[in-house]
Amino acid sequence: MTPLLTLDEVTVGYRKPVLGPVSLKVHAGEVLGLSGSNGCGKSTLLKSLSGESRLFSGSLRKAPGLQIGLQKQHPARLFGFPLSTEEYLRLTGADNTGLPARLQSLRRQRVDSLSGGQFQLLSIWACLASPAQLVLLDEPTNNLDPAGVQLLLELLVNRRHDQAVVLVSHEQDFMAGVTTRQLDVSTLHRPEF
């Protein structure tokens, strides 16, 4: 099976390298969890997959036509912008079929009036229900109550099987319940430049 994404000896960072070299492959159907201590480079590695952090060396190859969905640790919200949840989903290209009841009840509500947890779930659903074959989730349990975490777990377990997910989380129980494999980023080499 051809991987959706291949990292070969990549070193990533911002103004200077933060992490690397890292080699890995991501295939359709898997959920790769990036774990490790604060500041070890989990989010930086995730951002390198979407082009938001700098690739200093190595190669990052994407499958032809690969579409990526990204849910940031703190998703951007447009306050004071009259956009309904339904319109938000339409703009992101998300399929509303199978929309969870917890989000279904918010369809006509303005996005800027949602709680942090409601918006977090909406943002994650928008990624998972989009045409993206690769979904990147940075700390997806942020702002979620226990029922929200349970719903997120169900969404990830029941995602499309042609879709891969790479997620960053400090929640070990959550990671254990949803990932097909994990990479402890703390154990990877940190460049000395």
Image: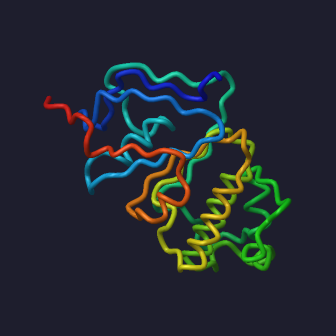
Residue at 27%, 37% in the rendered image: 188
From what the image shows, is residue 96 above or below residue 52?
A: below
Residue sitting nearer the eye, 110 or 65: 65
- Quarter of the image with the C terminus in it: top left
For residue 9, above or below residue 116: above
- Which quadrant of the figure has residue 118? bottom right
Considering every residue shown, the one lying at the far right of the view is 97
Residue at coordinates 72% horizontally, 52% vertically from top-left?
92
Image coordinates for residue 69, horizontal then vertical, percent? 62, 45
Q: Residue at x 60, y 72 (%)?
A: 150
In the depicted view, which residue is nearer to us: 17 or 184?
A: 184
Nearer to us in this view, 161 or 144: 161
Q: Position of residue 22 (x, y in %)?
A: 34, 29
Q: Is residue 149 above or below residue 185?
A: below
- Residue farthest left in this picture: 192
Res. 113 image quadrant: bottom right
Q: Position of residue 138 (x, y in %)?
A: 47, 54
Q: How many labels does the image show?
A: 0
Image point 79% across, 74% down: which residue?
104
Residue 73 to residue 143: above or below: above
